[in-house]
């Protein structure tokens, strides 16, 4: 799951740094994630994992880091896929 | 000036509004700073009402400040906008500076000395997107230094301190920003642009090359992204809406005076503008309801940073701004149709030229196209709120 999330970030995040250089808890906003790109990443994740983000997860915190995104997706899929 | 503490915010703002009204046409014609109105704000100690009482302020809510913006906007848009912009900056200090010793002490100074705060978020080369910076703050031991090509600093030459955005360090991404407070003795300004505009002429939003040096503790301890989302954007849209509502209220008051004068001359015959006045009154109520709903939503979300950072809240505040800024223009145009040539001419009791020109700034200060673009992006994932009252 984490690799899939990194792939989506690389594709839609428009980050000025390579995604594989980011630690799991790196602040994505500090790394240059714009609010426009964060929505594109959300859309990519919704499509890839067939989930829909409820409004209570649509805030900066849920997309602050790769770890935070993973937690949000895990919460939505109810899966333990994170071990992948 | 007499001491006025003990009377309500609205009564104090009303007295400032009376002073501002006397000079509004001159401020507009000469494109000069509304000095008399700002001096009256200082005398009434209105520049510190938002600061907590523990730091020498009066704990005013954003609704109370919006009411003052509206009262001032009814007489002089420029004075009202200066007051609004000052309080937008102050909201960032109150919301994000309370845990910092330097910023708390600074708020006490703002209250004691009635300091006027200005903002420098715009920069040459970023195309109006305040969530991007090119310049970076340089930290050297305990000192920070910043040079910024600030294409707009409203009343920059008249402010006592400037809150200015920059990248957080030399290697930071353009969106990784901080905001720093520099006091007047800590910066120089070299003028690069002159504010000679259609309206809002008295805000004196000239362009400046800013060069400052200060202790690094003056950098606000939160990322600017959070400051923007949690205090600045919401208070901007709400307090600006207060100002614009005030401009529209005065336009409708002039149109109503015109219709009533005609009605008195020929009782029994409905004056020609009467129906349009009813329409203008209807639109005015829409702007009022819209602004009040936004204020209530902000007051309810204020204590919850997650809610303030949520998409739903951003969409709601964006919508408040779009609706207010577009509708006030329609209202003032209606008022102009009612007053006819007497509204079009300067120097009559029904003149509306200044109102119309000032109100045209509303859709441009943060372009409505940019805001709609932002909302449309958010709506790709955020589901529209379906409740009526909640």
Image: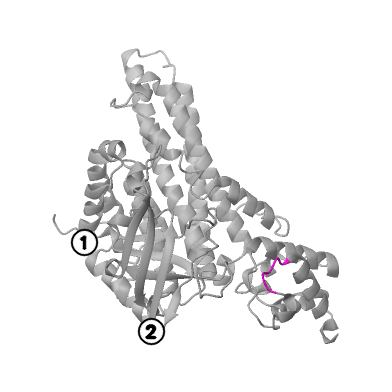
Q: Which residue lies under the disc numbered 1?
A: B5
Task: For the N terminus of chain B, give its image quadrant.
Answer: bottom left
Q: Residue at x 28, y 44 (%)?
A: B32
Which of label 1 and label 2 is nearer to you? Answer: 2
* Percent position of residue B76, x then y: 32, 42
Residue B56 appears in the picture as rendered: no
Query: Total number of numbered labels?
Result: 2
Q: CA distance from mark 1 to mark 2?
A: 39 Å
Q: Residue at x 54, y 47 (%)?
A: B367
Q: Which residue lies under the disc numbered 2?
A: B142
Which secondary structure lies at badge 1? loop
Please state which of residues B199 and B344 is positioned toward the viewer in this rendering: B199
* Percent position of residue B120, x then y: 42, 60
The majority secondary structure of the magenta stretch comes to: loop
Please provide the residue range marked out in magenta.
A13-17
Rendered view: B343 above or below B170: above
């Amino acid at each position: 799951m984490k690799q899939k999330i990194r792939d989506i970030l690389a594709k839609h995040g428009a980050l000025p740094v390579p995604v594989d250089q980011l630690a799991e808890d790196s602040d994505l906003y500090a790394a240059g994630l714009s609010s426009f790109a964060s929505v594109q990443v959300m859309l990519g994740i919704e499509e890839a994992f067939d989930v829909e983000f409820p409004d209570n997860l649509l805030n900066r915190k849920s997309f602050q880091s790769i770890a935070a995104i993973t937690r949000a997706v895990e919460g939505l899929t109810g899966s333990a896929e994170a071990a992948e | 000036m007499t001491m006025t503490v003990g009377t309500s915010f609205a009564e104090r703002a009303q007295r400032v509004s009376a002073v501002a009204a006397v000079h509004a046409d001159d401020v507009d014609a000469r494109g000069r700073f509304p000095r008399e109105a700002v001096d009256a704000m200082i005398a009434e100690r209105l520049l510190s009402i938002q600061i907590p009482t523990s730091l020498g302020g009066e704990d005013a809510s954003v609704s109370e400040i919006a009411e003052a913006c509206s009262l001032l906007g009814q007489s002089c848009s420029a004075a009202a906008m200066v007051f609004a912009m000052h309080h937008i900056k102050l909201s960032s200090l109150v919301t994000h500076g309370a845990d910092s010793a330097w910023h708390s002490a600074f708020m006490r100074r703002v209250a004691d000395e009635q300091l006027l705060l200005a903002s420098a978020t715009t920069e040459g080369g970023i195309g109006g997107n305040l969530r991007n910076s090119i310049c970076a703050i340089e930290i050297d031991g305990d000192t920070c230094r910043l040079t910024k090509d600030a294409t707009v600093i409203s009343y920059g030459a008249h402010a006592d301190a400037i809150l200015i955005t920059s990248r957080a360090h030399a290697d930071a991404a353009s969106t990784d920003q901080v905001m720093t407070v520099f006091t007047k003795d800590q910066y120089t300004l070299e003028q690069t642009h002159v504010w000679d505009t259609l309206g809002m002429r008295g805000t004196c939003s000239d362009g400046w090359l800013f060069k400052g040096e200060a202790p690094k503790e003056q950098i606000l301890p939160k990322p600017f992204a959070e400051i923007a989302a949690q205090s600045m954007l919401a208070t901007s849209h709400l307090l600006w809406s207060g100002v614009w509502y005030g401009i529209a209220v005065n336009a409708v008051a002039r149109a109503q005076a015109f219709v009533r004068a005609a009605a008195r001359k020929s009782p029994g015959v409905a004056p020609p503008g009467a129906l349009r006045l009813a329409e203008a009154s209807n639109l005015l109520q829409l702007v009022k309801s819209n602004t009040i709903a936004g204020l209530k939503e902000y007051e309810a979300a204020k204590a919850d940073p997650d809610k303030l950072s949520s998409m739903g809240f951003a969409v709601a505040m964006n919508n408040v701004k779009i609706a207010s800024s577009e509708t006030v223009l329609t209202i003032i145009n209606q008022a102009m149709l009612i007053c006819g040539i007497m509204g079009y001419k300067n120097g009559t009791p029904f003149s509306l030229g200044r109102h119309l020109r000032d109100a045209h700034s509303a859709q441009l200060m943060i372009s409505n196209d940019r805001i709609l673009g932002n909302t449309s992006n958010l709506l790709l994932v955020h589901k529209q709120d379906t409740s009526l009252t909640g």
